[in-house]
Image (cartoon, rainbow, N blue to C red):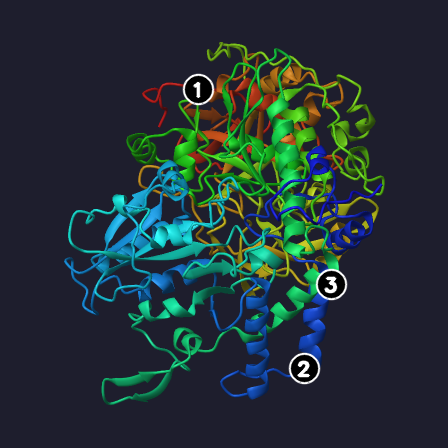
């Protein structure tokens, strides 16, 4: 059944049928669209506000164009320049305007565009910047960080810096009874100061759409009462800089209906490609105010002297604003971006592609919003809180974004880092934090400036993993939709939330879905989540996700019971399988010898990890000290050997570690050759992998100093050793109530990938230790080990499960910590003995005053 929409309705009037949350894009086009994103596999991508994805056919078209044509620097070649001019016209056509009204100036992106406008903007009455003559720089508090940074430039130009709240702005632009404040003259007065207002067409925080039909109200002075100089004799010419980056990604911007003076945008937000390219759309009648651009680059002048301070700028606006050669190949790719959009997306709504995208993404977000709103724990308490400025009743006020946090049964918050780990486990991409919008984040989380300053003083910074402070969230979770998303993506997200945090039966959403689309069951069956996927058909009618959620008091005392080192393991290749020691092993300057001495890197130099390639655990290294080789085994493949000692003629390579807390470290290492590289590539089914051995001269060290000394590290994340208490593992196994989780205690212990596995009677006692002596070797405790979704990978099969991360989170109130980090101090008897034997006694030291050395 195909849905019909009234063409007679206004562009923002919802049809009654649309309120059923039905699909906007028809079956044929949806299949065509999704076929261009097969690289996603079972990935659920809900981070379109950060960057949407490019379709495969777009890259094919760009590639064919570049292969079959020769494009030169447009400063040198008229043909290339003409092609670029065609692109400028296409951009203006997309926004329903033309070169007689607007000019396109290419930039590196929205941030560069915003910066260029303010750097060039003349705030003063004349061309001399001073405090008496300058106007104001006015911005919404809920702007992106890139806008907040503009106040530094404006302040240098003596402009008053004024911020307006979300509520005050909406009140001002919606109040038409301010005639006594409005300018009666139609034209700008050159003797007046110039004031620049910057605000977003759509909030990148939660998708709220600010009014864009109020340009004349603003120019006529509806915001004058917010100016510091309102009581003075200085009048103001108002100019509007519209941050349209979030809005234009899924909405139609009609510049024939609304005409801001400057519009800034990034093209990857719309098409997914190319990155590093944006634009300012400058209203020609407002261009004279951009007279203070100081720097001039190649192509921007008609005349210049090298021996005299003299130059003449070009007359055409874009030519004098675009310094140097523009990224013309990226610009030319925009032709294929527009063509691809027209080929893939139907004009289902009001005969317009962007209106179709707008409604499609709006209904997906609306569906998620109401499912979150209805989500409740078994005790009836709500499971989610949303941070929205609309209730999805009007598409004119809301885009395809939903921002929220989750709550536990007792009403306490679940940290967004905990959520992120579980989302990664289910292959769901969302954004967490404050999304570079501190104003909106602060307003919705109800935090004062004083509280935010205290958070900063306590160590919390933008982008870190401090998600809760005193039980209050420091950020949120954002899901944002693109034209390739479907209701299945909504259901997958809700399923994950029910599975991991709510533990109630997922209710079938009340909506109409085309039979051509995969059901949520089909989507889940394609997922490789071992735990629960085999029984995905029970989602709708079983209560297998009801579990006990009580957080019990955790004992922290230690008994006098005997403690023994039960197991020693090393992990020669980072993120690959363990090599378990049968008797004793030597401690080196970076930890156990050969522990994480190697890493597998991709052709881009990035380290491969189990987070993204779980099958790495199936590569089982064995260290043969007699033959001086490391032997690699993988299922039924013939083994391959790698020398332990690297000869000096090996070529040194620098490669960046994976994106983790050690991602800034540059590792100096040696390539282990083509034979093992080909073997690993075949085993993991990933082309162009290389095996790199860390150089013995590499000086990578712990970030945390120990008595002024930084301990050297191999390729481990944070410390030289990781200790696991088997009693704590047994305690955790008893707490896991999921009937689908079948690991025994030994298999569960393997998931934590500890170098040292001890056993004792008391669980959790290790969390209070300061030092520990194992046999004759002494270690310092460096802290608890933070956990991520890697512990959800079965180290024997490579399958992913929800446990044990979920239960760890429950038992420790969202603090994902398990195991303790150690650094080596030395032999307890000051001897040169560096060997550690299994089955030796373990002596913990709780009081720092009770230290043997």
| Image: 664 above or below 393 | below
Task: Indicate the position of residue 554 as horizontal and vertical percent values.
Answer: 51, 12
The tag earlier along the polypeptide, 3 or 2, is 3
Q: Is residue 91 left or right of residue 64?
A: left
Task: Give the vertical position of 821 relative to 639 (above or below).
Answer: above
x 75%, y 56%: residue: 36
Q: Which of 186 and 208 is in front in this view?
A: 186
What residue sits right under mark 1 in the picture? 768
* Residue 778 occupies quadrant: top left
Between marks 1 and 2 in the image, the one whose residue lies nearer the viewer = 2
Residue placed under numbered mark 2 in the picture:
69
Q: Which residue is label 3 attached to?
A: 57
Q: Is mark 1 on a helix, strand or loop?
A: helix
Q: Calculate the distance from the C-alpha at mark 3 to the C-alpha at mark 2.
A: 18 Å
The answer to whether any part of residue 755 appears in the image is no
Q: Nearer the viewer, mark 3 or mark 1?
A: 3
Instruction: Give the percent coordinates (x, y) of residue 125.
Output: 21, 64
Q: Helix, strand, or loop for circle 2?
A: loop
In the image, is residue 138 above or below residue 751? below
Q: Which residue is rendered at x = 28% and y = 70% of the image?
A: 292
Relative to 158, 659 lies left or right: right
- From the viewer's side, name the closer residue of 555 and 376: 376
Mark 1 vs 2, N-terminal side: 2
Q: Within 10 Å of the Cα at label 2, are there few (<14), some (14-19), or many (20+) other Cα atoms? A: few
Q: Residue 211 carries which label?
A: none
For disc 1, the neighbor class at 10 Å (few under 14, some 14 to 19, many from 20) is: some
| Residue 381 placement (x, y as % from top left) | 57, 15
Quarter of the picture holding the C terminus:
top left
With respect to residue 29, does 277 lie above or below?
A: below
């Amino acid at each position: 059944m195909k849905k019909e929409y009234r063409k007679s309705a206004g562009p923002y009037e919802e049809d009654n049928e649309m309120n059923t949350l039905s699909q906007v894009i028809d079956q044929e086009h949806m299949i065509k669209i999704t076929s261009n994103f097969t690289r996603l596999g079972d990935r659920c991508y809900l981070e379109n506000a950060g960057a949407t994805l490019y379709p495969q056919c777009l890259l094919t078209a760009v590639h064919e164009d570049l292969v079959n044509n020769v494009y030169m620097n447009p400063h040198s070649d008229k043909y290339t320049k003409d092609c670029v001019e065609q692109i400028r016209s296409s951009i203006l056509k997309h926004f329903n305007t033309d070169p007689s009204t607007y000019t396109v100036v290419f930039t590196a992106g929205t941030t560069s565009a915003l910066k260029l406008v303010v750097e060039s903007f003349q705030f003063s009455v004349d061309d001399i910047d001073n405090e008496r003559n300058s106007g104001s720089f006015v911005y919404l508090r809920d702007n992106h960080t890139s806008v907040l940074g503009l106040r530094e430039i404006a302040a240098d130009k003596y402009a008053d810096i004024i911020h307006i709240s979300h509520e005050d702005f909406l009140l001002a632009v919606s109040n038409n009874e301010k005639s006594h404040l409005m300018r009666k003259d139609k034209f700008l007065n050159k003797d007046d100061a110039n004031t620049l207002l910057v605000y977003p067409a759509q909030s990148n925080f939660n998708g709220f759409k600010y009014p864009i039909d109020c340009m004349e109200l603003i120019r006529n002075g509806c915001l004058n009462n917010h100016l510091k100089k309102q009581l003075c004799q200085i009048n103001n010419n108002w100019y509007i800089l519209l941050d349209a980056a979030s809005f234009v990604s899924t909405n139609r911007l009609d510049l024939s209906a609304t005409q801001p003076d400057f519009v800034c945008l990034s093209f990857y937000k719309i098409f997914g490609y190319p990155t590093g390219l944006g634009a300012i759309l400058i209203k020609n009648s407002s261009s004279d105010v951009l007279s203070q651009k100081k720097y001039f680059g190649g192509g921007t002048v008609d005349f210049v002297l090298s021996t005299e301070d003299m130059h003449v700028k070009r007359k055409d606006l874009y030519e004098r604003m675009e310094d140097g050669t523009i990224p013309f190949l990226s610009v030319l790719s925009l032709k294929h971006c527009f063509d691809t959009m027209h080929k893939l997306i139907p004009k289902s709504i009001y005969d317009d592609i962007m209106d179709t995208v707008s409604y499609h993404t709006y209904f997906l977000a609306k569906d998620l919003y109401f499912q979150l709103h209805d989500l409740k724990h078994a005790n009836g308490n709500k499971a989610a809180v949303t941070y929205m400025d609309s209730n999805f009743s009007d598409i004119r006020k809301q885009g395809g974004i939903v921002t929220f946090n989750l709550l536990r049964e007792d009403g306490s918050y679940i940290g967004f880092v905990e959520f992120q780990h579980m989302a990664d486990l289910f292959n769901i991409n969302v954004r967490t934090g404050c999304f570079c919008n501190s104003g909106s984040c602060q307003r919705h989380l109800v935090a004062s400036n004083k509280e935010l300053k205290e958070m900063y003083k306590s160590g919390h910074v933008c982008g870190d993993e401090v998600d809760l402070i005193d039980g209050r969230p420091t950020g949120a979770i954002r899901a944002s939709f693109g034209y390739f998303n479907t209701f299945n993506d909504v259901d997958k997200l809700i399923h994950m939330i029910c599975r991991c945090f709510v533990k109630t039966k997922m209710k079938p959403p009340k909506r109409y879905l085309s039979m051509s689309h995969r059901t949520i069951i089909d989507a889940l069956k394609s997922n490789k989540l071992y735990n629960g996927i085999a029984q995905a058909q029970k989602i709708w009618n079983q209560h297998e996700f009801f579990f006990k959620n009580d957080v019990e008091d955790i004992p922290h005392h230690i008994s006098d019971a005997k403690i023994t080192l039960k197991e020693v393991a090393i992990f020669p290749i980072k993120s690959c399988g363990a090599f378990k020691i049968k008797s004793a092993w030597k401690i080196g300057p970076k930890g156990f010898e050969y522990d994480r001495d190697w890493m597998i890197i991709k052709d881009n130099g990035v380290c491969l990890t189990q987070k993204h390639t779980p099958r790495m655990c199936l590569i089982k290294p064995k260290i043969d000290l007699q033959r001086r080789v490391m032997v690699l085994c993988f299922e039924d493949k013939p083994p391959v050997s790698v020398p332990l000692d690297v000869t000096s003629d090996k070529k040194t390579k620098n490669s960046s570690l994976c994106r983790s807390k050690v991602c800034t470290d540059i590792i100096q290492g040696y390539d282990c050759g083509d034979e093992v590289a080909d073997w690993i590539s075949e085993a993991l089914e990933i082309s162009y992998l290389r095996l790199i051995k860390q150089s013995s001269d590499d000086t990578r060290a712990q970030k945390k100093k120990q008595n002024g000394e930084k301990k050297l590290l191999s390729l481990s994340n944070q410390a030289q050793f990781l200790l696991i208490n088997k009693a704590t593992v047994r305690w955790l196994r008893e707490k896991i109530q999921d009937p689908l989780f079948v690991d025994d205690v030994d298999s569960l212990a393997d998931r934590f990938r500890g170098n040292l596995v001890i056993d004792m009677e008391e669980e959790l006692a290790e969390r209070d230790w300061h030092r520990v002596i194992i046999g004759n070797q002494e270690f310092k405790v460096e802290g608890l080990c933070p956990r991520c979704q890697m512990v959800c990978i079965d180290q024997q099969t490579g399958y992913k499960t929800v446990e044990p991360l979920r239960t760890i989170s429950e038992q420790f109130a969202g603090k994902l910590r398990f195991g303790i980090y150690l650094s080596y101090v030395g032999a307890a008897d000051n001897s040169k003995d560096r060997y550690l034997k299994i089955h030796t006694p373990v002596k913990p030291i709780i009081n720092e005053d009770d230290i043997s050395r």
